[in-house]
Image (tube, helix red, strand yellow):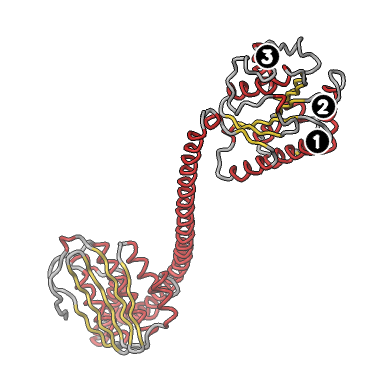
């Protein structure tokens, strides 16, 4: 049979032993546990000593914990079905919780009615007005498990309010595994604040002397400090990642906007180029062919006309020249046969005649060829750059430089025009946008080949320089002047 303090019952207590007759019968204690078996051992001591002292007990728990407690009490000689009948009430935690929850929140009036009735019922028929009640509840743990921590804290407060009108000693229990997130620390402190005493995890309560407990506290403090440092470092990393992600998203948005703008401009340029070619065909080649046709008609009527034959000869030569020029502008055949130096020389000479610009060209004469896609990109950049000079710079002269070195090829076009606006130049250097379609086109061609475009400009002129990496076996010699 159990004694009043439970000392002869063979039960190992996890918390400091307290005689039930010395117990604070208005206490509200919270216990944090790791293993169900150890919780039930401690709970059987708490409930068993109360029943052994002739007092009453109320257990509001899960079925598993109710059954486990009943087996341990029976081992004490306390049969919950017979020897303590009328002084022991066991209720299901989930069913009891439903009786006073409204819209996911504990209702104060219903709680007082339901739990007040249970307390009054267990005392009145069994013992006098000075009897005591030991109560255990884990309804709060169910609310926590449902993700309702604030509701659990509110339920703890309602138990405290009930203690103002009813006498009982209450113990609540939470599995420590539920407090696994950083933000749970603040909520745990709120829970502890609603209780008169706290029984910590059994890893602490099993320590047998004060020195061990102080050592454990120091170790836990070290772990907490390490965790705080780790959390702070993680936050810094996350902040840097967020900042990098925002910066990357901004760059992607800028690039996407630039590409859309470039695509739109390129389509517009394509249409303009088609219109220009159509005009060239109509105004030059078309006119020559019409004149040639008229001459042919006249020659049919009178074949012996030397002047008409000479004129027709000249018209055919002009037609051939116009077709060749248009063809070369679209894709110079000399570049396929000889390379960028020859194509650049032909284009610069022709552009100078058509635009009245004074142009000079410096390009290497060595026979080493560049890959075809790089030579084509350089030729297109040269076209774009000279077109920009002619249309926008107001320049009277420009110099074209092509230079090769191990691993690199550089094309530079420098004019003596009015220069590029400071704001436009700043935007282009920072984002590759904000300039005209010609510069944007150069930028994209260079970027696709792993190269870059640089612009230097002031009121004395502008220099546009494109640098593209090339295979090392394409290394060239020193700069050589071209014709």
Judge whether 327 appears above or below 233 on screen. Answer: below
Q: CA distance from mark 3 to mark 1?
A: 30 Å
Judge whether 368 appears above or below 68 on screen. Answer: below
Mark sitting on residue 2? 3
Image coordinates of residue 23 in percent, x first then y, are 71, 28
Q: Are marks 1 and 2 in contact (CB under 8 Å)?
A: yes
Asked which quadrant contains residue 353, the reply is: bottom left
Image coordinates of residue 33 in percent, x first then y, are 59, 30
- Which comes sooner in the sequence, label 3 or label 1? 3
* Residue 132 located left or right of residue 125: left
Judge whether 173 appears above or below 235 on screen. Answer: above
Which residue in the structure is indicated by mark 2? 119
Q: Are marks 3 and 2 in contact (CB under 8 Å)?
A: no
Judge whether 278 appears above or below 172 on screen. Answer: below
Image coordinates of residue 395 in percent, x first then y, are 33, 88
Q: CA distance from mark 1 to mark 2?
A: 10 Å
Q: Depth check: give the residue in front, 311 or 92.
A: 92
* Residue 341 located left or right of residue 322: left
Q: Depth check: give the residue in front, 133 or 243.
A: 133
Which quarter of the rendered picture does the N terminus lie within?
Answer: top right
Q: Residues within 10 Å of mark 1 (few under 14, many from 20)?
A: some
Q: Residue at x 65, y 26 (%)?
A: 18
Which quarter of the rendered picture does the C terminus lie within?
Answer: bottom left
Q: Secondary structure at mark 1?
A: helix
Q: Depth check: give the residue in front, 336 or 218.
A: 218
Asked if residue 294 can be seen in this view, the reply is no
Which residue in the structure is indicated by mark 1? 162
Q: Residues within 10 Å of mark 3 (few under 14, many from 20)?
A: many
Q: CA distance from mark 3 to mark 2?
A: 24 Å
Image mark count: 3
């Amino acid at each position: 049979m159990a004694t009043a303090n439970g000392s002869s019952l063979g039960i190992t207590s996890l918390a400091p032993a307290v005689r039930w007759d010395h117990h604070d019968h208005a206490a509200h204690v919270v216990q944090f546990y790791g293993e169900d078996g150890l919780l039930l051992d401690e709970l059987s001591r708490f409930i068993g000593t109360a029943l052994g002292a002739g007092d009453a007990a109320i257990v509001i728990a899960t079925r598993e914990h109710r059954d486990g407690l009943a087996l341990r009490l029976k081992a004490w000689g306390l049969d919950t079905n017979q020897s303590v009948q009328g002084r022991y009430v066991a209720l299901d935690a989930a069913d009891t919780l439903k009786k006073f929850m409204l819209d996911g929140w504990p209702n104060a009036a219903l709680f007082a009615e339901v739990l007040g009735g249970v307390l009054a019922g267990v005392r009145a028929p069994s013992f006098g007005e000075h009897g005591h009640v030991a109560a255990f509840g884990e309804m709060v743990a169910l609310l926590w498990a449902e993700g309702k921590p604030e509701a659990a804290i509110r339920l703890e407060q309602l138990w405290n309010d009930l203690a103002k009108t009813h006498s009982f000693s209450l113990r609540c229990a939470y599995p420590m595994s539920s407090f696994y997130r950083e933000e749970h620390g603040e909520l745990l402190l709120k829970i502890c604040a609603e209780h008169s005493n706290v029984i910590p995890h059994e890893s602490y309560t099993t320590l047998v002397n004060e020195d061990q407990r102080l050592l454990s506290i120091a170790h836990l403090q070290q772990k907490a400090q390490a965790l705080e440092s780790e959390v702070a470092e993680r936050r810094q990393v996350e902040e840097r990642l967020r900042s990098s992600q925002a910066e990357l998203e901004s760059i992607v948005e800028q690039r996407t906007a630039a590409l859309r703008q470039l695509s739109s401009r390129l389509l517009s340029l394509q249409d303009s180029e088609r219109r220009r070619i159509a005009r060239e065909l109509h105004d030059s080649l078309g006119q020559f062919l019409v004149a040639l046709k008229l001459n042919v008609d006249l020659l049919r009527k009178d074949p012996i006309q030397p002047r008409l034959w000479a004129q027709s000869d000249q018209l055919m030569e002009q037609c051939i020249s116009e077709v060749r020029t248009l063809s070369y502008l679209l894709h110079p055949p000399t570049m396929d046969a000889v390379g960028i130096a020859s194509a650049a020389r032909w284009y610069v000479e022709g552009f100078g005649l058509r635009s009245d610009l004074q142009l000079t060209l410096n390009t290497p004469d060595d026979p080493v060829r560049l890959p075809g896609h790089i030579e084509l990109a350089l030729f297109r950049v040269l076209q774009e750059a000279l077109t920009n000079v002619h249309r926008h710079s107001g320049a009277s002269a420009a110099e074209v430089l092509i230079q090769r070195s191990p691993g690199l090829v550089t094309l530079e076009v420098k004019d003596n025009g009015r220069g590029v606006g400071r704001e436009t130049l700043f935007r282009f250097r920072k984002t590759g946008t904000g300039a005209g379609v010609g510069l944007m086109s150069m930028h994209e061609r260079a970027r696709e080949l792993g190269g870059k475009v640089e612009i230097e400009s002031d009121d004395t002129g502008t220099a546009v320089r494109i640098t593209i990496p090339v295979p090392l076996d394409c290394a060239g010699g020193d700069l050589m002047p071209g014709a």
